[in-house]
Structures are given as structure tokens and as C-alpha cells.
Amino acid sequence: MTATWLLLAIGGPMIAGTVAIPFLQQHRVQVAAGVAGAVLQAVAAIMLVRQVATHGTVVVQSGGWPAPFGISLVADHFAALVLLAGAIAALAAIAFATMNVEEDRSRHGYFVFSNVLLGAVAAAFLTGDLFNLYVSFEVMLIASFVLLSLGHARRQARGAAVYVTLNLIASATFLTGAGLAYALTGTLNFADLAERLPLLEHREQSLALALLLLAAFVTKSAAFPFAAWLPASYHTPASDVSALFSGLLTKVGVYAVARTVTLLFPHEPVVQQVVLFLAGLTMIVGVLGALAQYEIRRLLAFHISSQVGYMLMGIGLMSPLALAGATFYMMQHMITKTSLFLVSGFIERGAGSGWLPRIGGLYRRDPATSAVFLVAALSLAGIPPFAGFVAKFTLARAGVEMDAWLIVGVSLAVSLLTLLSMVKIWVDAFWAAEPAEFRWHAPPRRLLMPAAALAVISASMGIFGAPLVELALTAGEELATPGTYIDAVLGSRAGT
Amino acid sequence: MEGPLAIAIGVLFGCAVYLLLQRSRGQAIIGLALLSSAANLFIFVAAGVGNGLAPLVHAGEYLPPEGAADPVPQALVLTAIVIGFGLLAFFITLSYRVYRITGSDDLDALADEDGPQ
């Protein structure tokens, strides 16, 4: 079993970003390196999914150290699928950036840091070690800090300040959790932790660890009650940066929550209940916040938080079907959300602003943009036959099977409100009469291409998505039976 | 030795939280510095503190001698210190830039202005 694809998914963008550092002054080299890194990762992710689908979990023991002692890199169905969706969304965002990033920002390292970000996200998805996950989070954070603060806007500095402060607090919490995990069990390997945590003498110890880790990961995934940093910051940088962030960053947090709940603490039902409780509140608070907004990107930013609630719902329910739903939800969310942020970037470029009262009449001026937005927005709201519908249907069905009526009711009501807020953008930006001061400078058509490609993928994930759903179901099965993961990682130990 | 250190860590965490709850950005910087120090110290104590032997494996053996110190938390804390230092440096630079832009040290000056930009 070859380790090439797994290592390339992390190393490809990291190497491309590093190689580009000496050439910061040459815009073309920067663009080429940026695209090369993203393409390498996308190819590696596709091959990794194929490899996992045929051979099962891929495990690489770095440095050749046997499992609990060295750092394990693990790709099961869940990790590989989420990585694939993230890589595709990131590729589209970077393709948009090649046409949107000015030379000034590329000179200050836009493409270097976006590639470092991609590598760190892949590392977070593929690592099998708690401390290594911490390091990946930090690399991802520092890259995102730089991307977020590249530029001169006044509100950008404010957004970055909120984002950085809250994420640093979450990091310190995570670090303390990692220390506690080592103090309690003497290991940091996920598989090894999963075996030892249920054997702890005092239940409070394991609960304290669970809550410490959850507090950190819930902050990173912008879920209630620690969601404030996301809507305060995501609309402030250039649209290419928001698009890149919208698909990737919070999902790494959700991924970490999923691993914590399903692998480390499946023996603590309280943890699942806490996650489920937070899931419901996150959905509601996020969507209500979104409804109150008048700026496209800000509205979409609140929706990220609301949608994270759905993913947490799947994780909290923890049946194989619910986990499959969460996996599929994460995948389609990365694609759809990035598409919406890219469309809003296109609109802002043409209209000079994303402020809804200032734009209107886009449907008549630009039907193609309207079509792309409509597909992505309907998918987000969960209208058949798009991908969002498949994801929400799976989650709702899993909830009904477990008689979790409350959370199912909340999720369906929030779906309606999501549709309502999408209708708000549609009516204000596309249908309403043009305001008097409205000027539309049609951007080059190619700027719409990345968003259109993602919208097509999102639609076809719903219509022709059966193979993907099959893979997601396997991922759900694997997540619900942690033994698979543990055996795959520690299997080498059994022989010795 | 763990007892006094545990109390020290608790005090550090308490001070950090207190400072982070203040409105001033300057205090938030110190709060974050204390927070990361507290977390680092916590990891350091995780394996127990004592007069351990150096964890050197003798030739021909696979395990370090009995009573050797656990090297893992030291490796972890070293990584964490470096990362924490880098992030704090970035945070200070960013805070200075926000101060230059807003002309105020008060976090409320950061309150988002709603409206078209």
C-alpha cells in the first residue's frame, strides 16, 4: 500500500508555497505556484479517495516508528472524503484568486500563505495524533491570520483583531487539553487514546478532558456559544480570502469535533448530548443572525455557523446513518458555500459593494450569474434535487429513526429560514429595481467560472451523487465503529 | 513538587482570564501571554516533576533505565513555546496596527460599524 497520495496531499501545497517564497516579486511565478499546489492537492485527494475506497484505511507511520510511539498519518473514508471536497473548493477559490489578487497582495505572500493553509488543512484531516493536530491547527491559523490582514481596509484590521484573539484563546484551551490527555493516559495517538480513555479510574477526568477539547473545537468550528468571531471577520478581507476560508477553516473544527466524539469518547453519552444541544442552538442563532443582515457576504458568514449546526447534529446523533449524513453535509457545504462566496465576490467586483440596498436588477443585467447563484443558494437551503437536499434528508431520516424529534424539527424549521434568507438576497440583488446610484461594471466572464464549476459540482452531487453517498455511508459506518480505526492504526503492534 | 506548581498554574490561568475580560487591548496581550505560559507549564508538569535520570537507552537495549524522565512532555512543551511565541509576536504587531488605525486601545473602538463600506 503506497503512502504517496497521502503525503502529496499535505506536502504538495506546502512545497509549492515554500518554493514560491524567493520569488515574491514575480506575480506570475506566485500565481503558477499557487495553482500548482492546489492542483497537486486535488489530484492527491482524488487518488487517496480511490485508494481508501479499494483498500480501506491508509496508515502511514512517519519515520517508520511503530504506532503509538511515532506520529501516525491516517486516511479513512471520512478523512479522505472531507479532504477531497476541501481540495476542490480550495482549487476553485485559488483559481478565482489568480484573477482577483492584485500584484501588491501577491508580493506580500498571498499565494504562499494560501498554499501553506491548504497543506495545514490536509495535515489536520490526516493526522492520527492529538499534538500533531494542534500543530496543524496553529500552522493553519498563522496562515489565515496573514491572509486576513493583507490589505488596508479599516474594518479588516478590526475583523482580524477579533478573529485572532478568539482563536488564540481556543488554541491555548486545546493545548491544555492535549497536556491533560497526556497526563491522564501517557499517549497522544488517537487510536491509543481511544483504547485507554475508557479505562480511566475516575469518570470526571475523562469528562473534563472531553469538555476541554470540545470547547476548543467548538470555537474553531464557529458553533454556539463561541461563534462570534466568524461573522465579525469573514466579510472583511478581499472576497478571494473569504471564499477560501468559508470552505475550509470551520470544517477542520467540525472534523476535530467528529473525531473527539466518535473516536475518543463514544463511551460518554453526555458528550453526544452536549454536542446535540449545541447543534440545535447553533442552527437557530446562526440563521436568525443571517436574516438580520444586509450585506451578502455577512449574511453568508452567519450561514456558515448555522450550517455547522447541521454537521454537529449528525455527529451528536452518532448513528452510522447520521454520521454519513454529517460527512456528506460537510462535503457539499464546502463546495456550495465556496461557490456562493465566489459569486458574491463577482457581484462585489461588478457593483463595487455587497450592500444589498445598493444593488439590484442583476437578473436582467447578468442572467448567467443569477443562474449560478440560484443553484448554489437552493442547494444550501436543501431544495431537491441538489446536494444540500440529500445531506439534509439523510440527517433528518437518521434523526427520525432515533426518535430525536426535537432536533429534526429544529433542523427543518431552520431550513425554511435558510431558504427565506436566500430569497432575501435573490429578491434584493437580482429582482429588485436598480437603485438610483447603482453602477454595474461587468467583470470579465472568466471570473465567474470557478463559482459556476462549483455550482455544477454541487448540483451533480445531488443528481448523480449515488457513488459519493455510498462512500459517505461507509464513512459513517467506520466512524460509528471506532474499532476499525484503532485496528488500522495499531494493527502493526499486534504482530510484534 | 507538583503541588506548588499546580497552584501556580491555577493562578496563571486565573490572571489570564481576568486580563482577557478587560476592555484594554494591552491587557489582552498580557492575558494571552499568561494563558499560553499557563498551558505550557501544565504540559510540563503532565509527566510529573522529579529528579529523573536522563532518558538515554543503553547500547543493545530497547528501553531507557528504570526511573528515567519522560522526554515527551519536554518535546511537546518546546514545540508549544515556539508556536506560542510566534503567535504572540503576530498578535502584538496586529494590535499595534489596529491601534494605529483606530487610535484607541479600547476594544469597544472595534465594535463593528454596520453599513455600506
Image (tube, grey):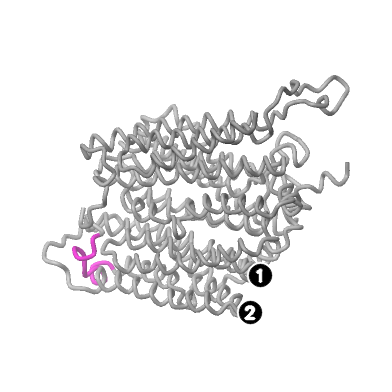
Q: Dot 2 lies on which element? A: helix
Q: Amino acid at mark 2?
A: Glu
Q: Quadrant of residue B96?
A: top left
Q: Nearer the viewer, residue A146 or A257?
A: A257
Q: Dot 1 lies on which element? A: loop
Image-based side of A468 in relation to B96, left or right: right
Q: Which mark is residue A401?
A: 2
Start-end of magenta stretch: A355-366
Look at the image and tell me in which quarter the C terminus of chain A lies.
top right
B60 versus A142 height, above or below = above
User: Disc 1 to disc 2, how far (Cα)?
Assistant: 9 Å
The residue shown at (74%, 51%) is: A201
Q: Position of residue A191 (x, y in %)?
A: 72, 49
Q: Which mark is residue A319?
A: 1
Image-based side of A106 in relation to A60, left or right: left
Look at the numbered discs 1 and 2 and tell me whether their residues touch, using CB distance below 8 Å.
Answer: yes
Q: Which mark is residue A341?
A: none
Q: Position of residue A3 (x, y in %)?
A: 70, 43
